[in-house]
Every structure is written in C-alpha cells, then in structure tokens.
Amino acid sequence: MQKLIKDFDIPNKKIETWKFTDLKKIFEKNIFEPLSTSIKNESIKSNVDTNVEKNIFFDPNINFVIFENGFVKKINIQSKNLEIKPTKIASKKQIIDQKNFSRNDSLLEINETFLNDNLLIKIKKGTKLKEPISIFYYNSEKKNYLINNRINVIAEKDTEAVINEIFISNNKAIYWNNVHSYICLEQNSKLEHYKIQLEGDSSIHSSSSSVNCNSSSIYNNFIFSIGGSLSRIEVNSSINSSDINFNIKGLYLAKTNQHHDITTVMQHKHPESKSNQHIKGILQKNSSGVFQGKVIVSQDAQKTDAFQFNQNLLLSESAEANAKPELEIYADDVKCSHGATTGELDEQMLFYLRSRGLNKEEAQKVLIEGFINELFDEIKNSELKKKLLLTSKKNFFK
Amino acid sequence: MSIDVETKKTVKSITKKYKYGFTTNVESDKAPKGLNEDIVKLISKKKDEPKWLLDWRLKAFRAWLKMDEPNWSMVKFPKIDYQDSYYYSAPKPKKKLKSLNEVDPAILSTYEKLGIPLEEQKRLAGVAVDYVFDSTSVATTFKDQLAKLGIIFCSFSEAVKKHPELIKKYLGTVIPYTDNYFATLNSAVFSDGSFVYIPPGVRCPMELSTYFRINAENTGQFERTLIIADKDSYVSYLEGCTAPMRDENQLHAACVELITLDNAEIKYSTVQNWYPGDEKGKGGVYNFVTKRGACRGNNSKISWTQVETGSAITWKYPSCILQGDNSVGEFYSVAITNNFQQADTGTKMIHLGKNTKSTIISKGISAGKGQNTYRGLVRMGPKATNGRNFTQCDSLLIGDRCGAHTVPYIEVKNQSAKVEHEATTSKISDEQMFYCRQRGLDQENAVSLIVNGFCKEVLKELPMEFAVEAQKLLGISLEGSVG
C-alpha cells in the first residue's frame, strides 16, 4: 500500500537529536502534502522562471542545474568529463554505505518514499573542474508542497570540483524542502561544497549531506543559512581512511521569528585524519538558533585531530541560542577539543567605536560584519564572498 | 602507542587489590526482600514516622511504579531486579548510646581500618562525624558544641521526630518526589541520612562530616540528606565513603537537597570510593545519586566539589538552581574510571535570577576500559540578566581501550548572559613521563604526580581533611592502569 505522510513520525523533541527543533509542532498547524510526480510533465513545458536567472548567484556560463517547484527544469553542462543526469539508483545502497550513517529520525525515509527527482553528478577520474556546478532549488507555489529531491555526487580519484547548492524562492511560496545529498569522495579527490539557504520566509528547509571520505580526500563545506521559518541543515561524515581533511564552516543569520539549526556528526574511524568545524550564529528578535555537533573518535582512530567551535551572538532580549557540542572519544592518542560561547556584542568594543564618532547602529554593524567576516575570509572565491556578504547585509543588517 | 607492552605488564603485576575490601560482622535487622507498599509502610513504622511522611513515601512509591528506568546516559549495566533487594536493614539497637565507648567495637574497628579512628578524629581534626552505618546513625559527636550555636546536625529520622516543622517545610522542595526514577525510589524507601540546619547569622565553626558505608549483604542504601543554611550562615559539609568488597552489584540511590537563603553559603564536598568491581568488571556499586541545591536567597552560594574514584557505575549530576539575584553556583569534579568502571556525571546550572554566576570545572580520567562521560546543562532563563557561566571540562585518557565523552547542553534565553564552554581531550605525553622517570620517579608515582597536577584545580577546592585523602585515592584508583 502507498505510504502517506501521516504514516511517518515527523521529527520532534522526543528524539534526542531533535531536542531543540520541533518539526512536528509546525506540521500540526500546517500540513504539507508530498508533491506528486504526476505534476512533473506540466512543469517541464514552461520556461525557467526569470527569478532564477535574475538571482545574483546565477551565472549562465558555468555548469548548472535548476530545480523548479520540485523537478529538474534545466541542466547545463559546460565542462568535459562531467556527468549530470537524473538517475534511478538507490543512492543509499550504491553511493554510500548506509551502515556508515545511522539515523534515528524519519527524514531520509520520507525523502526516499516521496522522491521527486534524483540527480547523479559524477566527476570523472583525474578531472579538475574549472567551472563550478551550481544547483538551484527554486519554488514559487503556495500550495504547501513537501518537496523531496536528492543529489548524489561521486568525485572519482584525483578530481577537484566546486558545488554550490542555492535554495531560493519568490518569497511568497509555502513549501517544505526536504533535500538530501550523498557524497562519495574517492581517493585524493577534493570537493568544495557551498550550501546557500535563502528559502522563502514561510518555508521549511531540511537538508543533509552524508559524506563518505576515502584516503587523502579533502572536503570543504560552507553553510550559509538565512531563509525559511524553520531550517535544519545536517552534515554527517564518515572518515574511512587516513589523511583526510574535513572542514565545516557554518553561519546562520536568524531573522525575526526564525529558527535555524545546524547539526553535524563527525565520525573518525581511521587514524591520522583531521576535522575542523566552526559554526557561528547571530540571532534577532524572537528567533532561535541551534548548533549540535558530535565528534566521534573510534578506538582505531589514533592521531586524530578534531576541533569544533561554536559562537553565538544574541542581538535581542527575546532571542534564544542552544548549543550541544559533543565529544565521544574512544582513542587515547588524539587531539580533540571544542569550545562554545554565547553572548551579546561587547560593551567595550561598542564604546571604542562610538568614542570614534560612530553612532550606535553603525558601531553594531561594524562589529556584526567583523563577526561574520571571520568565516567569510575562509572563502577563496572572492566573487562568491562578495555576493554572500551582500546577501547578508541586504537581508539581515541593512 | 605511548607505553610498551612490557611496562604495562610490570605495572599490572604490582596492582594492589582494593584496599578497603573487608566486611564487618554486625547482626543486621533486615526487612524481607522485595519492594511493595507494605515494605514502604514497614520502613516508616520502624522509624516511628508521622503519617504525613508515610503518605509522602507512598505517593512517591505509586509515582515510581509508573516510571521507567532512564536509559539516556552512556552507562550500560544488566537490568536491576528491584524485587531482589532488601530495602531496610539496621544494626540491632542494643541500648541508647551515651559515649563512643558504647559503640559496637566491630564498627569502631572498621573505621580504624579506614584510617579514621573516631576518638582521634574527634579530638584532633575537630570534625563532628555523623556516622551512618548501614542506614542507621550509630553515633553522633560534637552535638553539644553545635547545639550551643543552635546548629542542628543529626540523623534524618531524629530530625523527623524533633524538628518536623523544618522537614515538612523543606523536604522534597528541591527534588520533588516525582523528579526522576531513582530519586522517586529514594523518596519511597529512604532509610536514613543526615539533616543539617544552620540558623541565621551562624558560621558553622567546623566541617560537618558523614561517613557512609554499605555493609549488610544485598542492601540497597537509600540515604537522604537535607541541608538548610538560613540567612547569612555558612556551612561546609563533607561526605565520604568506602565500601567492602562484594561480588553482587549493590544499588545505591541517594538524594541530597541543599537550600541556601539570603547571603548563605553551603560548601558540599564528596569523596566517593565505593567498591568499583574487580579487574574483570565483576561486582561493584551502582551509584545513582540525585544531588541538587537551590540558591533561594539573594547573594547565596552553593559549591559542589566531588572526587569520584569508586563505584562500578556512577550516575550523578549535582546541580544548582540559582533563583536568588547575585547567587553563585560552583561545581568542581574529578572522576576516575579504571578497569570496567563507568561514570556519567556532570552538573546542571539553572540560572533564574539576575547577575547569577556559575563555574564548572570537570576533570575526567579514563584508564583501562573505563568510560567517562561529562554531561552538563547550563541554562540561562529569560530573567537571568547578566548571567555568567564558565565551563571547562578536560579529559585525560590512559590506555587505548578507554573512552572519554563530553555532552554539554547550553541553552541561553537572555541576551546579556555570557556562556563559555571549553573542553579538551589529551593523554599523558611521553615527554611528561620521561621527565618524571628521569628524575627517579617510578612509573606509578609519575602517573600519580601527573594526574594530581591535572586535577589540581579541583583538589584545591577540597577542605584540608579531604585533600590529603583524595590525593592518595587518585593514586590508588589508577594503580594497574598504564601511565
């Protein structure tokens, strides 16, 4: 029998990993119905919505994929040795080993059951892609759709690539975007993965990246989360070999009434790999932010170097920041540490700036920009950095 | 690999057996095994308790029946059969005791073995010791001196008889009888414990101390401690325990409630060295304790210091509820797990009042196959303006078969509150060992020295009497592990 959305247990506070984020509560007020695949054909006929092409992150001269209202609308491949196509493979089995990523919630199951489009991106052996791959998820419907898409990335041996995932809408749309990616990094491959979450204000965003790393691979992840009424972004890693470098930089800017959640699980299973996480959050009126990070170092993963840092900045009395940075360590010869701080803008710093003639708002702006820039400085692509800073300014602190 | 196999063997060969493993032969007065309403009534009747207290116990018992054993902690143990345990046992009362000479000589010699001869301690250390021997207080010292100041320091059952108004007013106000599985069980069947009341403006002139000891076979011990520091008062309370060697696991579910009113301070120190089980993980005490303090008054302070070296399983989160403005909570902890020991310990700092401050320093040491978890919560309520917390938890791993885990929860609902958390995990470095060995210290002393240095921040918070014992304990607990 066909499963319905109501047959699933929507993640809620009873599940330990969802302690601070209650999806079920929203779901009770606002029912989201899975988007049926029969709508697909209609959607393909029309042209790409101009809102996508007008978006500042859009560039017609690079590789791109456009998802519109749940389905692939356009695929544009510029580079050689790059394959992007819809696929039917069950990514859970073929792209990554399911056993490496155990979960205790239903999001992936929901994704699997109601899957709309499943995309395979393969970077062929030895290829160093010059042009990035941008994936746009655009929504314009107000129909409370639950959209399930999936991206499978295989970076073959000795490859280099940049993938940008950009979530946008016309800001009137109401939907729940449930998008998951499975990433397999083969030996000596390098992937830069940007997730830019600019969903509409009335939407729900839940996404995850499950990254399977093989020896000498490098994964640099940058998360930028600013949209949606509720957003949950997860990164799950499985470090299966030595000499792997895994980095996550994350920033959430929580506007009034928003809820942002960044959750990471870092599994060090083999010796001599490195991971580094730095997550920052800024919170405005009535907003709440969550960072949950777990570093697991198995018994065999000696000489692991794992670092995790979370900083939250509260800009309003009614803002709320929750953090749960966890370490689970079973090996003795490791370097693991984590830190977490939460506070408001420093009085002394504000005083310093104001004594130099800046008014209160200007001084605050300077400090907030400084707080954000610490993460943006890590972005090598200066064009992208500029666009992200511009987006932050436009949407968050004018 | 930091230390070669040969060194491991050498260290193992000099491992000493549990130093305090012995049993005292005192006839015990036991209730039948098992747990039901009749047992609860029996305990209450044996203690000649008023009806309101029996009702409270029964309410707790009925609540307990509906509860499930918590399973969220990182400890594993075979299911406990709560019906296969004695819930009441007391040394047979011979006659009323007037002086120490009348105390059962067997009990006195037990304490002598532990290195705390009652007489000597009484005279030299100036410590009033309320000995708890298997659930019933046997002797209380220094009562007269304390009475002059109006300080009440007696067993819980005595307090129920003599000061029912205080018990009625404060019992269960910090840990309600519905709080959690083990606290509720304790509320239903608690045997005895200590009661302390410090009147307004009094600074308790000596450290108050209780020595706990589990003795009769298969006796779960359910202590209940209640300490109230009235306005402008101060008290330092010491709790320490050692237990005899046992094969069967013993359950211990204690409750400790602390209350401080305006400007009052309680300093609560624990050294816990119960039987941790043998090298193969057999036996050992299950230590499931609920400890919580409420800073009710403004400018009040509660400070927890613990050195946890014993028990097969430790499940313990001494917490502070900072209700009063400017109140302060502190938690200093050293937890050692060796062999198959498991510890899941930490604290909760709930900031409710303005300008409340808390400090958490936790040092976890894992050796052998021990698993050590720090689990803590720092919550800044919406009204905790200018609340401040600093948390530091460091873990030291000795050997490659142990684990150290950190699970902090940070919840901030106030803009002006500042919360900082940091944690590190490390091992004893080869350089440190080399340095010590080169200066003539043997492996064991070198480890002990380094571990003592690692824990210094916490040990210095302990009262003098405990600091010495604690330092020795760290060394003893780590014997047989590898440096």
Image: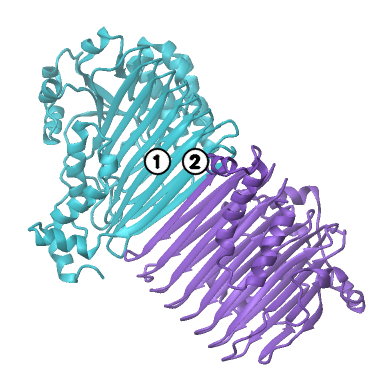
Instruction: Pick whichever, A343 or A221, lies toward us.
Output: A343
Is B212 drawn above or below residue A175 in the view shown? above
Chain name for mark 2: B
Where residue B392 sits in the image (x, y, percent)? Answer: 39, 47
What's the mark number on residue A304? none
Q: Amino acid at mark 2?
A: Val
Residue A1, visible in the rendered structure: no
Residue at figure coordinates x 46%, y 39% from the top left: B389
Q: Nearer the viewer, residue A392 or A268?
A: A392
Mark 1 surroundings within 10 Å by alpha-carbon count, few (fewer than 14), some (14 through 19), many (20 or more): many
Amino acid type, residue under disc 1 in the picture: Ile
Chain B rendered in what hue?
Answer: cyan
- Measuring from the top left, give residue A87's x and y in whole percent: 73, 83
Q: Which residue is mark 1?
A: B360
Kindly identify which numbered label has been placed on residue B378.
Answer: 2
SS at badge 1 = strand
User: Is the residue marked by circle 2 packed among few (<14), some (14-19), or many (20+) residues within 10 Å?
Assistant: many
Q: Quadrant of the N terminus of chain B?
A: bottom left
